[in-house]
């Protein structure tokens, strides 16, 4: 996007995005607030600061590609894309209603600017790799960004993709793991532990960056690095807090797939004022 | 005539979701049978296997979000003497685990392997198509040796799940997310492969499965007010089909309607049509999902929009009757 934002503007925007996530899921009475709130800085930094894209021309050939592989976190993507001007802000609260463009999981039939329809976990990285290979074949400079859930990377396909990416030296793709340590049934360590996570990616031939996924400066810096790392794919392991920004949702597995009640929406919005 | 309609309607009390009935039945059986083990893929609170997990933590295997591996592990457990109940949403376990169901379970005939897919059909509602199984019956029926069941309510789920667990062969069990109207009396006996006639009728036969059984009963009531006598069969077992019941229905009514919450291209309808063609060719109409994926919405809103309510079943029956008259 042209006219990139200052740090202060970005930080203010993340609050707006969080408010909208709370309002949307509250209005829908279902949905996934926890994993949307953990990814706010990641998605906002990419769309507002890092990626080259043009909301007025969503099918611009040389745009950077973004895939939210953990599709259930779509409220954050919808809020960010609406703020960019891709889709109407005033319809955000129709989330999950019959006929809404804001479907329960990202659906290209309703929002053509989405790069993929996701929701079945484990598939986005492979699709992103195909896009990255196409860019390389065409000699194009655009890059591909794929956001993965930590629970999601238990899927075998992720590791098939991980092996493929380093074998084919795909260095124009960045995977970001939203490492909030919670999945659906509970904490990742109790469902199926991922550690040592950075070592896993390294052993698969990836360049690994670990950072605080709520720090915009850290994210900015990290996204500048991959351009310099040649011959290897990069993964950003973003340490995050599920439900970030809403005290009663933070780090509580309950808020994976439960919407806030009207009273909880009110409480949350006060905290995010 | 109208007395019967009133009576039927009062019988359709809302019951538990079939996934909930499955979770309860599983726990009950597991209390009496130590061979029962469960695998789940980070959805135990939704598939309702969490009740089993709490009661028998050492017999519960949390597999993470990794369905293909889970099916393989379940196949191994079953091959080594356990009764393995493997569960996730239908769309994930049937689609992502299909190759493993084929080669690790069906091909070697691992008999004590039971897979339970919950959140089947479009009545899951707001989550949308990525979580909606509209092809699972077709996939499961493409596994030689598998018995495939799709119970309509909590009563039939409890009885049929028990039958599935003790059936000498692999079984696919289809369960739903939404509460399901109770269509069976509590004392009814069920047998795998034997359809249940819920409403007698001579003009047209409606063969339904899952959530569509209740809609078929409601459709039969509508039709009755028009002077049409419609038979309703709960075809809870999709494979093996109750060929005799279908033969009788086709021969005695000459008009057969099939209703299912599944793609019409590959589910119960085409299987019933095959039996009708082989036994007693008759006029047929099909109610189901028409070559599309659905979308987000309330369960009721979606069933209405995608043509899966009683009025659609009744309309199909009228079309069948018209065609029968035309000869
Ligand atoms: C293949 C597949 N299996 C299961 C699910 C159901 N499901 C939806 S979200 C979720 C947990 C995801 O956890 P994680 O990737 O850590 O996401 P986050 O915590 O960031 O929300 C599960 C199991 C799914 N969407 N896809």
Image: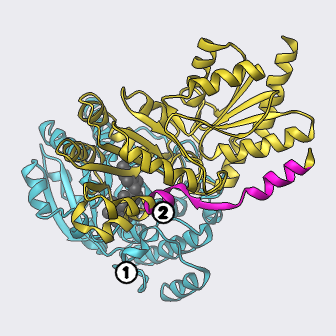
Chain colours: A cyan, B yellow
Residue drawn at x 75%, y 44% is B217
Q: Main secondary structure of the magenta part?
A: helix
Residue B251 versus residue B135 in the image, above or below:
above
Q: Residue B15 lies in magenta, yes or no?
A: yes
Counting from the top left corner in percent of width and height, residue B323 is at 82, 17
Is B146 in front, or is B310? B146
Task: Please give left or right for residue A193 compared with residue A35 in the image.
Answer: left
- Marks 2, 1 in one chain: yes
Counting from the top left corner in percent of width and height, residue B9 is at 80, 54
The chain under label 1 reads A
Task: Please give left or right for residue B230 compared with residue A23 in the image.
Answer: right
Q: Secondary structure at mark 2?
A: helix
State the CA–CA distance, disc 2 to disc 1.
21 Å
Residue hosting label 1: A250
Residue A38 visible (yes or no): yes
Residue A50 versus residue A265 in the image, above or below:
above
Quadrant, the N terminus of chain A: bottom left
Q: Quadrant of residue B261?
A: top right
Q: Secondary structure at mark 1?
A: loop
Residue hosting label 2: A80
Task: Please give left or right for residue A231 compared with residue B137 in the image.
Answer: left
Residue B234 versus residue B15 in the image, above or below:
above
Q: Quadrant of residue B63?
A: bottom left
Ligand 1 falls in which quarter?
bottom left
Counting from the top left corner in percent of width and height, residue A50 is at 34, 59
Residue drawn at x 28%, y 44% is B71
The chain under label 2 reads A
Residue A45 visible (yes or no): no
Which residues lie in the magenta part? B3-24
């Amino acid at each position: 996007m042209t006219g990139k934002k200052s740090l202060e503007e970005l930080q203010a925007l993340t609050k707006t995005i969080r408010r909208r996530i709370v309002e949307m899921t509250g209005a829908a009475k279902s949905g996934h607030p926890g994993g949307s709130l953990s990814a706010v800085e990641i998605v906002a930094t990419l769309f507002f600061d890092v990626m080259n894209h043009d909301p007025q021309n969503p099918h611009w050939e040389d745009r950077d590609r973004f895939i939210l592989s953990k599709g259930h976190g779509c409220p954050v993507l919808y809020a960010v894309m609406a703020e960019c001007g891709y889709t109407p802000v005033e319809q955000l609260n129709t989330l999950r209603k019959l006929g809404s463009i804001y479907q329960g999981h990202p659906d290209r039939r309703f929002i053509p600017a989405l790069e993929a329809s996701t929701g079945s976990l484990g598939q986005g990285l492979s699709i992103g790799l195909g896009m990255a290979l196409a860019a390389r074949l065409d000699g194009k400079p655009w890059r591909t960004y794929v956001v993965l859930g930590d629970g999601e990377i238990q899927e075998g396909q992720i590791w098939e993709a991980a092996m493929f990416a380093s074998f084919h030296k795909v260095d124009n793709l960045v995977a970001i793991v939203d490492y909030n340590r919670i999945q659906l049934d509970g904490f990742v360590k109790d469902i199926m532990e991922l550690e040592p996570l950075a070592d896993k990616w390294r052993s698969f031939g990836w360049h690994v960056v670990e950072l605080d996924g709520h720090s915009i400066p850290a994210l900015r810096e990290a996204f500048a690095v991959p351009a310099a790392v040649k011959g290897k794919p990069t993964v950003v392991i973003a340490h995050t807090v599920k439900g970030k920004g809403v005290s009663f949702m933070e780090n509580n597995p309950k808020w994976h797939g439960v919407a806030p009640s009207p009273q909880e929406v009110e409480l949350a919005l006060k905290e995010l004022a | 005539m109208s007395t019967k309609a009133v009576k039927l309607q009062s019988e359709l009390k809302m019951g538990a979701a079939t996934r909930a009935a499955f979770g309860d039945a599983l726990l009950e059986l597991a209390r009496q049978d130590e061979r029962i083990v469960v695998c789940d893929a980070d959805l135990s609170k939704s598939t309702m296997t969490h009740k089993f997990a709490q009661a028998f933590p050492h017999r519960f295997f949390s597999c993470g979000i990794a369905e293909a591996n889970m099916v393989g592990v379940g196949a191994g457990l079953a091959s080594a003497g356990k009764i393995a109940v493997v569960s996730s949403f239908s769309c994930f376990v049937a689609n992502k685990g299909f190759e493993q169901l084929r080669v690790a379970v069906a091909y070697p005939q691992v008999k004590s392997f039971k897979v339970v897919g919950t959140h089947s059909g479009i009545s899951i509602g707001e989550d949308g198509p990525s979580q909606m199984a509209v092809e699972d019956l077709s996939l499961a029926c493409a596994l030689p040796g598998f018995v495939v069941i799709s119970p309509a309510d909590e009563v039939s789920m409890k009885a049929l799940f028990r039958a599935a667990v003790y059936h000498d062969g692999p079984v696919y069990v289809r369960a739903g997310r939404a509460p399901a109207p109770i269509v069976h009396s509590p004392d009814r006996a069920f047998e795998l492969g034997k359809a249940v006639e819920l409403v007698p009728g001579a003009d047209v036969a409606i063969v339904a499965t899952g959530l569509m059984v209740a809609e078929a009963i409601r459709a039969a009531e509508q039709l009755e007010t028009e002077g049409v006598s419609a038979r309703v069969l709960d075809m809870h077992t999709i494979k093996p089909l109750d060929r005799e019941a279908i033969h009788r229905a086709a021969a005695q009514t000459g008009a057969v309607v099939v209703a299912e919450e599944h793609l019409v291209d590959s589910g119960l309808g085409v299987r019933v049509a095959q039996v009708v063609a082989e036994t007693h060719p008759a006029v047929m109409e099909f109610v189901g999902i028409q070559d599309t994926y659905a979308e987000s919405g309330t369960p009721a809103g979606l069933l209405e929009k995608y043509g899966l309510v009683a009025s659609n079943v009744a309309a199909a029956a009228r079309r069948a009757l018209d065609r029968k008259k035309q000869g």
